[in-house]
Amino acid sequence: MPDWICKPHQELTVPEIYAILRLRTEVFVIEQQCIFQDMDGKDLTGRTSHLMAWQDGQLAAYCRILDPSLKNGQIEIGRVITAPWTRGQGLGHELIRHAMAEVRQRWPGRAMYLGAQARLRNYYGGHGFVQVTEEYIEDGIPHVGMRLDEAA
């Protein structure tokens, strides 16, 4: 059972930052063979927070929750990732549920947005997200914009 921690960027420790960047590189750059500028300046902006699941001293799952000022008032959940050694255990669904709960607690009633890999549109759809853009290519991978509107 993982330990869930969500911190604003100002409270991250050096080992946490290292683990986050290591996992993002391991999966997005190496596993998915996607060369892109992962450190895009958004990790340290405003009220951006980092949701982490730690298991046996290792980062098992992660996503960042961007400050709403970066996306016209809606909250963007991004860099959604599970460690390869955790896959098939339902941790990804748990990660999305925790991210949605964090958003609801911090910014009640605000819409949530994510740029999903197109192959995962049904995965996020199962959590209530609806496709709101046509398919587009981001860093060489087909994506779709998805949104979840919350009643205020």
Image (cartoon, rainbow, N blue to C red):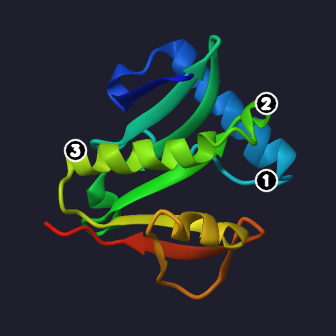
Give the CA separation, mark 1 to mark 2: 22 Å
Residue 32 drawn above or below residue 83: below
Q: Which mark is residue 72?
A: none
Badge 1 vs badge 2, beta-carbon distance below 8 Å: no
In this picture, residue 96 sits left or right of residue 108 = right
Which of the 4 image quarters holds residue 139? bottom right
**Mark toward the start of the polypeptide (3 vs 2):** 2
Rendered residue at 48%/62% (across/down): 127
**Mark toward the start of the polypeptide (3 vs 1):** 1
Decide if residue 42 is in sight here: no
In this picture, residue 11 sits left or right of residue 88 = left
Please state, as top left, top right, bottom left or bottom right, where the N terminus lies in the image.
Answer: top right
Q: In the rendered structure, which amino acid carries the disc numbered 3? A: Gln
* Residue position marked by numbered label 1 in the rendering: 35
State the residue in front, 45 or 105: 105
Q: Which mark is residue 85?
A: 2
Give the SS element for disc 1: loop
Give the CA separation, mark 3 to mark 2: 30 Å
Rendered residue at 78%/69% (across/down): 140
* Residue position marked by numbered label 3 in the rendering: 105
Rendered residue at 62%/11% (across/down): 57
Decide if residue 9 is in sight here: yes
